[in-house]
């Protein structure tokens, strides 16, 4: 089972049609069919249910597809790391969560490529659990996640913090209240849309418990855009970190106070994973950039009307 055969299989699994898969691979149909059959013989199992026009993955085929994609990504990453030994070039694979993470990563990449223009980046965005899973599987070199994280298996350092906010449908009575903040108690009886990370849901319940309430969480989801779509239709009020918010005429953003919470972001990597010189250089660049920001004015554009919570604000964890 070599990498070339795995590429053939992955293409066939994505197209579910041998003719289209062969076209993508710039080869004729018979050799591709023979390669797939030989792979099935090697593994001793059927990978596809063959119909008249389309293929369908078997359970074994679905498992092999997931593993093959990971193996091909790792092979490409390994090749790039070896090539980077000849000089600071190659690709840094970064996984990030929604919220402030993309803003942070954008300015780090801009600064890093200013010093090393031959370096490229591959970004992947998802929920906290998905990002950490990719990191643990070696599919990402580093990640930007919201705390808490598994400090036993991951190394890292904090890079930023921000408040939790309520994103309220514009026609909701709470959207018309004065000021840019809202007490947590105002949300006690409202339908809540919240991040799906299990630790985050429990943290929200503990937060509301402080005011003697139970949050009415009617939807848990990983993607901020899904939350916005639901809030726009007045399904509920979103509770998310501040910089997930972008100006939207259908929504009103208010910082949650009394009691307030903040989220901390961290740049993390797997302790057991051996990094290339390129990745180590990027980690050091981020660390040095944070030190420079403490000593000088911030050399980057901050989102408009950003509110930074007091340093002693509790974390939602």
Image: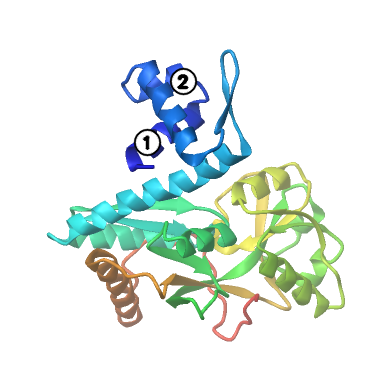
The outermost residue toward the bottom is: 312
The outermost residue toward the top is: 52
Residue annotated with mark 1: 5
Q: Earlier in the sequence, mark 2 or mark 1?
A: 1
Q: Nearer the viewer, residue 237 or 263?
A: 263
Which quadrant of the structure image shows residue 190? bottom right
> How many marks overall?
2
> With respect to residue 65, does 305 lie above or below?
below
Label 2: how many Cα within 10 Å (few below 14, some 14–19, many 20+): many
| Residue in the image at 65% along x and 76% along y | 317
| Residue in the image at 18% along x and 62% along y | 115
Residue 224 in the figure: left or right of residue 64: right
Residue 205 visible from this viewpoint: yes
> With respect to residue 288, does 87 lie above or below?
above
Residue 196 in the figure: left or right of residue 99: right
Q: CA distance from mark 2 to mark 1?
A: 14 Å
- Numbered mark located on residue 192 in the image: none
| Residue in the image at 54% along x and 84% along y | 311
- Numbered mark located on residue 18 in the image: 2
């Amino acid at each position: 089972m070599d990498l070339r055969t795995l590429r053939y299989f992955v293409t066939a699994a994505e197209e579910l049609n041998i003719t289209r898969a062969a076209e993508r691979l710039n080869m004729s149909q018979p050799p591709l069919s023979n390669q797939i059959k030989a792979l099935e013989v090697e593994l001793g199992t059927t990978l596809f249910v063959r119909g008249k026009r389309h293929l369908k993955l078997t359970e074994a085929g679905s498992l092999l597809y997931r593993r093959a994609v990971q193996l091909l990504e790792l092979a490409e990453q390994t090749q790039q790391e070896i090539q980077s030994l000849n000089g600071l070039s190659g690709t840094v694979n970064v996984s990030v969560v929604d919220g402030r993470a993309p803003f942070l990563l954008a300015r780090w990449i801009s600064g890093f490529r200013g010093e090393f223009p031959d370096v490229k980046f591959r970004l992947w965005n998802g929920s906290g659990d998905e990002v950490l899973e990719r990191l643990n599987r070696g599919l990402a070199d580093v990640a930007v996640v919201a705390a808490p994280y598994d400090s036993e298996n991951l190394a890292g350092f904090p890079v930023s913090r921000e408040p939790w906010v309520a994103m309220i449908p514009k026609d909701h009575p709470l959207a018309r209240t004065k000021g840019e903040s809202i007490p947590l108690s105002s949300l006690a009886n409202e339908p809540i849309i919240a991040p799906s990370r299990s630790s985050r849901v429990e943290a929200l319940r503990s937060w509301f418990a402080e005011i003697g309430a139970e949050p009415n969480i009617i939807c848990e989801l990983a993607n901020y855009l899904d939350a916005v779509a639901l809030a726009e239709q007045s399904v509920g009020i979103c509770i998310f970190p501040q910089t997930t918010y972008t100006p939207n005429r259908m929504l009103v953003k208010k910082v949650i106070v009394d009691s307030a919470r903040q989220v901390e972001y961290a740049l993390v990597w797997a302790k057991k994973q051996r990094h290339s010189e390129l990745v180590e250089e990027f980690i050091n660049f981020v660390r040095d950039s944070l030190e420079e920001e403490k000593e000088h004015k911030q050399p980057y554009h901050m989102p408009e009307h950003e509110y930074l919570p007091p340093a002693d604000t509790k974390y939602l964890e």
